[in-house]
Image (cartoon, helix red, strand yellow):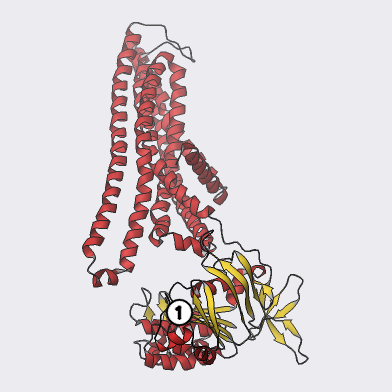
């Protein structure tokens, strides 16, 4: 990440802070500046009190007047420090509120934006790496906002205020301090710049390690069954060693910076004491904005201001590492937020309709079980489930097509089956129906409407999908079934489970439908998880169903039970079925045999058997597609 990118990210964070909290942020900054002023002003009183004491010592008769003035100034200092403590408590509380609120809003923006990303994004990014956006990367912003920004404002204000006070009293002593500060800045740039590239690398390695750990945890059964523990440990050690090496180098530079700056400050303090003493003793001509002569009080105040000045410069330099880390994290976060969302220019929506006795239809807010496509002009087209592919070509990567000249049609209420070897393109075809991906050539129509013209959310709402890989969420069995239709009643969810053949095993669970599931339903068998997924699709009551190896994880006895429920579920619906078990597709209206992205045979089961082609050989077990 170059300096321009870091600056751009920093400006963007500040802009978002002011957008999220347009009133609180300025109030907090004012409080921080007041706190900084309260820290700088006492140097003036130290000089004046020292001069009063020096004058009283030289003239014993003036001690009573001096003591009253000293008491007054000390009282004012105490009141100022009390006010400063109160202001500091206020702004730290405000910063805590702003910081957590900012992170809350950022996480929400990230997650909301992620919901609109195309499937391709999740196919090309490791899930652990994506999780790192919400953990390591977001935490760098917490440190930046809660610690680094207040420190920058407060220390920067103190440095400017103290510099002004020093110039007011003595230009010569100020030049000595400024020379030392230039040395501090040179060291800060040298070591801070050296650590920056390693902190950026550290953020990437953190994401890589999290991605690998999640990958291994998800595949723990596979790791163990193939006795791959040592290889996994070796790979993790490699990633961990890279992370350790990068972090060590980053922190080695960072940890050197503080002590070096602090010791330069100590040396500078000694030099100021010597130069100030020499100037005072020699009664050298003092150059100052105030025009005052160099007094002992001025030297004493300068010693305190030197320590305060250098300590705040040190504080500023210490923020370099946190800022660099935050910019690395912000860069990754903004890349996620700036990722182009799914292209959705569709204008046709899906609405519930009611059919009148004369055959006319009109839109209704009630769930009637009948749907229609609503065009921008308000006209309605009854949803029938007529899906057609016309000369469709598709490739996941440009110039690498995996589907070639696919032409097919599914009439309303028909069952269309795809068979073929793994990688033949069966699942890819169904992914194009719901527009997980867009075709490169040809046309797909749904009830005569180009799917590109249908709003994606409405298109997908009209489709029910049961995948081979089942995803169950943390919650009860009932909640997982209701995931298909959040408005469904408990009774409707139970009816869907009965239809799918899942009711009998659910009732045998410890708490029935209220049994808690976690870790993708790890306390259920693969077949039971699949039955719940089928029930979830059933409760959605969609007009078109896509069944991708829906019964692949179910034993033959259970399959017979499920198949009866599936037949009821498929009644009156357009259904696309992908299956390796040819027994599950024999009753399809049309069976399509795919090989290397092409349809090589099509027809009913009887027609394909009579043809004694590839399907016949697959059915009799004499041949396998490769």
Crowding at label 1, few (<14), some or many (≥20) Cα neighbours within 10 Å?
Answer: many
Q: Nearer the viewer, residue 504 or 173?
A: 504
Q: Quadrant of the C terminus?
A: bottom left
In the image, is residue 177 above or below residue 452? above
Q: Regarding mark 1 in the picture, which secondary structure is present there? A: helix
In the image, is residue 497 above or below residue 205? below
Q: Quadrant of the N terminus?
A: top left
The mark total stands at 1
Q: Position of residue 107 (x, y in %)?
A: 47, 57
Q: Position of residue 616 (x, y in %)?
A: 46, 87
Q: Nearer the viewer, residue 139 or 625?
A: 625
Residue 620 found in image quarter? bottom left
Q: Position of residue 245 (x, y in %)?
A: 27, 45
Tell which residue pokes out farthest to the front in this image.
612
Q: Nearer the viewer, residue 410 or 292?
A: 410
Q: Position of residue 179 (x, y in %)?
A: 38, 19
Q: Which residue is mark 1?
A: 480
Specify whether residue 49 is in view.
no
Side (left or right) of 511 relative to 538: left
In the image, is residue 16 above or below residue 606? above
Side (left or right) of 326 relative to 394: left
Specify whether residue 297 is in view.
yes
């Amino acid at each position: 990440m170059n300096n321009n990118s870091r600056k751009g990210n920093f400006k963007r964070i500040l802009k978002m802070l002011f957008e999220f909290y347009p009133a609180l942020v300025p109030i907090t900054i004012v409080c921080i500046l007041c706190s900084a002023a309260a820290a700088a002003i006492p140097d003036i009183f130290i000089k004046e009190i020292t001069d009063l004491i020096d004058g009283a010592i030289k003239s014993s008769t003036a001690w009573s007047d001096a003591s009253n003035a000293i008491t007054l100034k000390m009282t004012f200092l105490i009141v100022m420090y009390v006010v400063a403590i109160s202001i500091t408590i206020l702004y730290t509380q405000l910063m805590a509120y702003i910081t957590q609120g900012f992170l809350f809003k950022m996480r929400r923006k990230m997650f909301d934006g992620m919901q609109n990303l195309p499937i391709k994004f999740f196919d090309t990014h490791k899930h652990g790496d994506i999780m790192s956006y919400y953990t390591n990367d977001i935490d760098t912003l917490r440190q930046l906002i809660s610690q680094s920004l207040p420190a920058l404002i407060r220390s920067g204000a103190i440095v400017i205020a103290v510099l002004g006070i020093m110039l007011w009293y003595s230009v010569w002593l100020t030049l000595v301090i400024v020379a030392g500060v230039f040395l501090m800045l040179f060291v800060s740039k040298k070591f801070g710049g050296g650590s920056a590239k390693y902190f950026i690398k550290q953020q990437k390695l953190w994401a890589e390690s999290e991605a690998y750990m999640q990958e291994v945890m998800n595949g723990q059964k596979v790791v163990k069954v193939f006795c791959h523990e040592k290889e996994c440990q070796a790979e993790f050690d490699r990633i961990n060693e890279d992370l350790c090496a990068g972090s060590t180098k980053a922190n080695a530079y960072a940890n050197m910076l503080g002590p070096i700056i602090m010791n330069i400050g100590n040396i500078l303090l000694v030099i100021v004491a010597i130069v100030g003493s020499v100037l005072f003793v020699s009664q050298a001509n003092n150059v100052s904005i105030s025009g005052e002569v160099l007094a002992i009080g001025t030297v004493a105040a300068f010693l305190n201001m030197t320590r305060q000045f250098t300590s705040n410069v040190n504080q500023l330099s210490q923020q370099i590492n946190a800022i660099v880390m935050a910019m690395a994290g912000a860069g990754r976060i903004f890349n996620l937020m700036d990722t182009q969302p799914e292209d959705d220019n569709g204008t046709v929506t899906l609405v519930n309709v009611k059919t009148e006795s004369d055959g006319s239809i009109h839109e209704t807010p009630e769930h009637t079980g009948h749907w229609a496509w609503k065009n921008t002009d308000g006209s309605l087209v009854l949803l029938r489930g007529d899906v057609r592919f016309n000369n469709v070509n598709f490739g996941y990567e440009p110039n690498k097509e995996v589907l070639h000249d696919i032409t097919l049609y599914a009439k309303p209420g028909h069952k269309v089956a795809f068979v073929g070897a793994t990688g033949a393109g069966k699942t890819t075809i169904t992914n194009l129906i719901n527009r997980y991906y867009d075709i490169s050539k040809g046309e797909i129509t749904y009830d005569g409407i180009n799917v590109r013209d249908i709003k994606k959310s409405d298109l997908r709402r009209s489709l029910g999908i049961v995948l081979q890989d089942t995803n169950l969420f943390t919650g009860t069995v009932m909640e997982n079934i209701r995931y298909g239709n959040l408005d469904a009643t408990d009774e409707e969810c139970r009816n869907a489970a009965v239809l799918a053949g899942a009711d009998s095993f659910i009732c045998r669970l410890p708490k029935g439908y209220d049994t808690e599931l976690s870790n993708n339903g790890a306390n259920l068998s693969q077949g039971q998880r699949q039955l719940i997924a089928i029930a979830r699709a059933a409760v959605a009551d969609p007009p078109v169903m896509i069944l991708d190896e829906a019964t692949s994880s179910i034993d033959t006895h259970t399959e017979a039970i499920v198949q009866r429920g599936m037949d009821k579920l498929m009644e009156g619906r357009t259904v696309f079925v992908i299956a390796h078990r040819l027994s599950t597709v024999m009753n399809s209206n049309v069976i399509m045999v795919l090989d290397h992205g092409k349809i090589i045979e099509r027809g009913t089961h009887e027609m394909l058997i009579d043809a004694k082609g590839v399907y016949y050989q697959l059915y009799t077990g004499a041949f396998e597609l490769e």
